[in-house]
Amino acid sequence: MLVKNWMTREVITLTPDRSMMKAAKLMKDNDISRLPIVNDDGELVGIVSDRDIKEASPSKATTLDMHELYYLLSEIKVKDIMTRKTLTVTDEDTVEKAAVVMEESKVGGLPVVDARNKCVGIITNSDVFKVLIQITGVLHGGVQMGLSLSNEPGSLNPVLEYLKENNARVMSVLTSFEPEQGNMRHVFIRIRDMDKTDLNRLREGVAERFDLMFWVRDSVHGLTG
C-alpha cells in the first residue's frame, strides 16, 4: 500500500511570507490542523500546525487593545513560527512506514514529497484509519477470528483449507509477529457472514483443530450514520 494511493492530493499550502492570521483562517475554514509551507517553486520548506499558532498568539490576559492586537498578529509571518526541519514521507513510501513515523514522532500528519522535494500531498492518521478499514473488510461485517499459529512455513494452509471445505469466504488475512511470542504468531482472518447454524458449526470446528483466541461477529452498519 503506497502513500500516493491514500494521501490527500489537493493539499492546502502557504508560502513563508504569508501572515499567521491567514494560516489560522485557512485551517479553521478547512477544518485541518496543519499546513505545509512551500516556496515559490512548490518545494517544502516547513510546516505550521494549530499548536504553533496557539503558542505564538498573545495570551487572553494581554493588555493590548484590539487595534494593537490586530497589528501584532498581522506582523507575525508563517516563517516566524513554522517548523523548518519537517518530517516527511515520499509518495512511493508505504502507508505502514508513514504510520510508524507518525506514531514514533507523535504527529497526526505528514507532508508527502516527490523526488524533487515538491509537496505533492499530505497523509494523516485519518488516512491510515481508512486503510485499516479497507484492508480488513470490516464495512462488510462478517466474522473475525483470532488464531495463534506456529511461525513455521505453511502453518496457515490447514486453516485456509478447513475454511474452504466449509464454504467460508475469506475477506482478509492479517498476521502479526512479536519477539515475545516466541515461535508463534497471531493471525486474524475475516470471513463473510453465514447461516447461523453453519457459523456455529464452523466455530466449533476451528476451536477443535486450532488455537482459537477469539471469534467476533461484526456489524458496523448504522454506527457512522
Image (cartoon, rainbow, N blue to C red):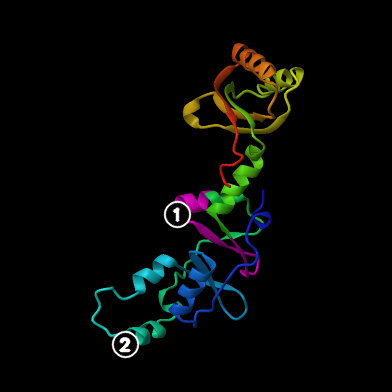
Left or right placement of residue 222 versus residue 81 in this view: right
Q: Which of the labelled discs sits on residue 105, or is there none? A: 1
Residue 204: give x, y in percent of width and height. 62, 13
Residue 141 at what x, y percent from top left? 64, 34
Q: Secondary structure at mark 2?
A: helix
Residue 111 among magenta residues: yes
Going by the numbered disc 2, the residue's amino acid type is Glu
- Name the image quarter holding residue 175: top right
Q: Residue at x 46, y 81 (%)?
A: 19
Picture mark count: 2
Give the label, 1 or 2, closer to the camera: 2
Q: Is residue 46 visible?
A: no
Would you say residue 42 sits in the magenta stretch?
Answer: no
Q: Amino acid at mark 1?
A: Ser
Q: Is residue 214 left or right of residue 137?
A: left
User: Quick one: SS at disc 1?
Assistant: helix
Image coordinates of residue 73 in percent, x first then y, are 38, 82
Nearer the N terminus, badge 1 or badge 2?
Answer: 2
Q: Is residue 87 above or below residue 118?
A: above
Above or below for 138 versus 92: above
Residue at 36% x, 87% y is: 71
The residue shown at (61%, 48%) is 130
As measured in the structure, the alpha-carbon distance from the residue carrying label 1 to the one carrying label 2 is 37 Å
The label number, if any, that marks residue 68 in the structure image: 2
Label for residue 194?
A: none
Query: Does the rendering let one see residue 173?
Result: yes
Range shown magenta: 100-122
Residue situated in front as seen by the camera: 122 or 223 = 223
Residue 190 location in percent, x, y? 65, 30
Residue 67 shown left or right of residue 165 in the figure: left
